[in-house]
Amino acid sequence: MKIIVNGETVISDAPDLAALLVELGKSEAKVATSVNEAFVPKTMRSGHALHDGDRIEIVAPRQGG
């Protein structure tokens, strides 16, 4: 399926958000995720099915002042 990850088109076979993070090498990273502008908590990622055309944002926390 074709999805958009952080503004880039990606072809993926991942059935859910957790599998996509594994596919992208971010499964161990501390990140925030959203699908179609809706926040998806870490505990819900494995149950959040992905569909063709979904827009996913993966954001790492940043420190600053």
Image (cartoon, rainbow, N blue to C red):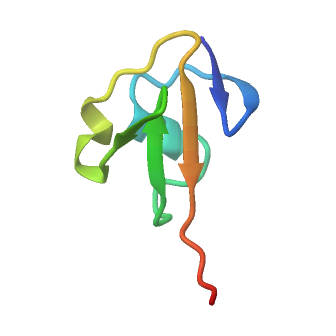
Give above or below for 49 relative to 35: above
Residue under the point 45% across and 39% down: 34
Residue sitting at x 39%, y 28%: 16
How many marks do you count on the picture?
Answer: 0
Vertical placement of residue 5 versus 25, above or below: above
Question: Above or below — where is 50 with respect to 61?
Answer: above
Residue in the image at 48% along x and 32% along y:
37
Residue 59 falls in image quadrant: bottom right
Nearer to us in this view, 52 or 59: 59
Q: x and y percent of residue 65 in the render?
A: 62, 90
Q: Quadrant of residue 5?
A: top right
| The N terminus, quarter of image | top right
Residue 54 in the image, given as x and y percentages of width and height:
54, 19
Q: Nearer the viewer, residue 51 or 24?
A: 51
Query: In this rendering, would 18 be left or right of 11?
Result: left
- In the displayed image of the protein, which residue is found farthest to the bottom? 65
For this view, does 25 lie left or right of residue 34?
right
Is 21 displayed left or right of 16 in the figure? right
Outermost right residue: 8
Decide which of 29, 53 is in the foreground and name it. Answer: 53
Which quarter of the picture shows residue 53? top right
Residue sitting at x 60%, y 75%:
62
Q: Position of residue 13 (x, y in %)?
A: 54, 19
Camera-side residue: 59 or 30? 59
